[in-house]
Image (cartoon, helix red, strand yellow):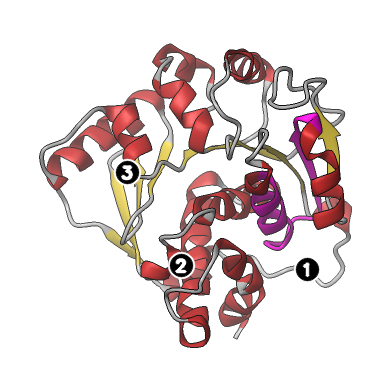
Amino acid sequence: MKSPYLITKEEALRVYKPVNPHTHKGLQGHAVIIAGSYGKIGAAVLASKSCLKSGCGLVTTFIPKCGYQILQISIPEVMTVTDENTNFITNIHLPLIPQAVGIGPGIGKELGTQKALFEFLRINKAPLVIDADALNILAENLSWFELVPENTILTPHPKELERLIGKWNSDSEKFQKTIAFSEKYKVIVVMKGAPTFIINKSEIYQNTTGNAALATAGSGDVLTGILTSLLAQGYEPKYAAKLGVYLHGLTADLALPKTGYESFTASTIIKYLGKAFLELDN
């Protein structure tokens, strides 16, 4: 295996596009987050909030009915569209054409949700981030990857990755299998871990930010929001992936002296996103 390229501050700055002082919300991208099921509406909240706080102009979140009040109260800046079903997603209908979509956090694997994912992939044309249960559903239906747009970003944690590519016996085998998967389906795989790697066909990138504080519930939902936001702002998927994982990790590096490992949560990542962007601006 060839040695990975490092995602350093210099590399992040190479792809980072500072906000135009004359912009307005309509130029900053409209992202859609499709997330949540009964008991996991928090995943939708975390992904939507991080999406908004990573610079995109508008966020619409699609959730089952049970999440409506939770979302409207916890993030007033986000618009909400609900499924006709109460507890899980069964039919994804969007009243807009978004610049990017993040799908999967907390959606569960109900049969109705699997069908909804299939129908969504069939008609979706927007750049895509696929995470969590959406990945688990795809792992059981690999032929559906034919419907996934080229350069879609997948964000599996180790267990989700194993479901997609099968078990591995060594690190080098894990990378070989992931590269083969990325090449076969023409997708970008963000292998979450310590450190996080990005596999884009035969190219391997290793993130240089982040620490063990990120090993906490909801951390991945926040990453999905960040990546979807960057795509909606017009970043090419390969650049969105690099900048997204860099910023996500950087929040933990900035917060650690204040929070310690134990009290750092996924909400802390969102809280420190502004400081992470300012680090790039300085």
Q: Which amino acid does label 1 sit on?
A: Asn
Q: Which amino acid does label 2 sit on?
A: Gly
Image x and y of residue 105, in percent = 58, 40
Label 2, on which residue?
249
In this picture, which residue range is highlighted in magenta? 44-65
Residue 209 vs 113, above or below: the answer is below
Q: Distance between the residues labelled 3 and 1?
A: 38 Å
Residue 175 vs 23, above or below: the answer is above
Does residue 183 appear to the left or right of 71 in the view shown? Answer: left
Q: Crowding at label 3, few (<14), some or many (≥20) Cα neighbours within 10 Å?
A: few
Label 1, on which residue?
20
Q: Which tag, 3 or 1, sits closer to the chain's start?
A: 1
Q: How far apart are marks 2 and 3 (CA)?
A: 17 Å
Residue at point 14%, 38% (across, down): 173
Q: Are marks 3 and 1 in contact (CB under 8 Å)?
A: no
Image x and y of residue 118, in percent = 59, 15
* Residue 152 in sight here: no
Residue 123 vs 197, above or below: the answer is above
